[in-house]
Image (spheres, rainbow, N blue to C red):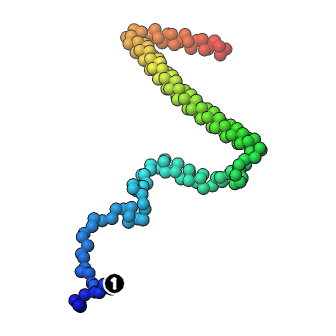
Amino acid sequence: MSTGGAKDGELQVVAAPEKTKPALPPLPLAARTGSTALVEYTAPVLKEEEEDLEVKLRRILENVPVRVSNTSGSSAGSGSGDFHQYRQMRRREQDRLARMDADYQRRKELAEFNMRREERMKAAEEQTEKKRLKRQKKKQRKKEKKMKPNAGGEECRREDDDDSDDDGDETGN
């Protein structure tokens, strides 16, 4: 009996009805850029000083060669001489770290000293200014006191001035 369908063991190709794709949300930025990161990196907005430091750091990293000395071989195990090389490399690294710490401490102490020095100089300047104002006020009061008794005191002052002129004439003879 033939029903017009596929016989056992035979496959029949039938066109499937077209499915319409449902509207999908837009792809995330990572998928569009080809990155697989969960969180995208956005460059921070740098201030001018920070930007200068970044440029300097980049220049240093590009121009300073990476030097690796006394590297161990790729063969398995280590020989009897490797321990001495290890100790020497470790000592050099410890010395380098000690120099960096000493340099940091020196710079820190120098900065603290300069800060304390500035504070002391500022305090001394304020004291000097106070004393200067006090001297000027005293001088001004003395001037005003001399000028106050103008009625009869002017004659006395002229005589005092003449006396000082006489002293100058005696030294001139």
Is residue 21 in sight in this rendering? yes
Residue bearing the label numbered 1: 9
Residue 64 locus on image (x, y percent)? 64, 52
Residue sitting at 27 percent across and 84 percent down? Answer: 15
Residue type beneath disc 1: Gly
What SS does tag 1 mark? Answer: loop
Residue sitting at 42 percent across and 9 percent down? Answer: 153
- Residue 39: quadrant of the picture: bottom left
- Circle 1 crowding by C-alpha within 10 Å: few under 14, some 14–19, many from 20: few
- Residue 172: quadrant of the picture: top right
Image: 163 above or below 103: above
Image: 79 above or below 25: above
- Residue 33: quadrant of the picture: bottom left
Is residue 103 in sight in this rendering? no
Q: Which residue is more in the foreground, 99 or 53?
A: 99
Q: Residue furthest right?
A: 81
Q: Quadrant of the C terminus?
A: top right
Q: Which residue is more in the foreground, 65 or 74?
A: 74
Residue 150 locus on image (x, y percent)? 39, 12
Residue sitting at 60 percent across and 32 percent down? Answer: 105
Judge left or right: residue 107 versus residue 147.
Answer: right
Image: 75 above or below 162: below
Residue 154 locus on image (x, y percent)? 43, 12
Q: Quadrant of the N terminus?
A: bottom left
Q: Which residue is more in the foreground, 86 or 112?
A: 86
Residue sitting at 39 percent across and 8 percent down? Answer: 152
Residue 159 locus on image (x, y percent)? 50, 10
Q: Residue furthest front?
A: 1
Q: Which residue is more in the foreground, 136 or 173?
A: 136
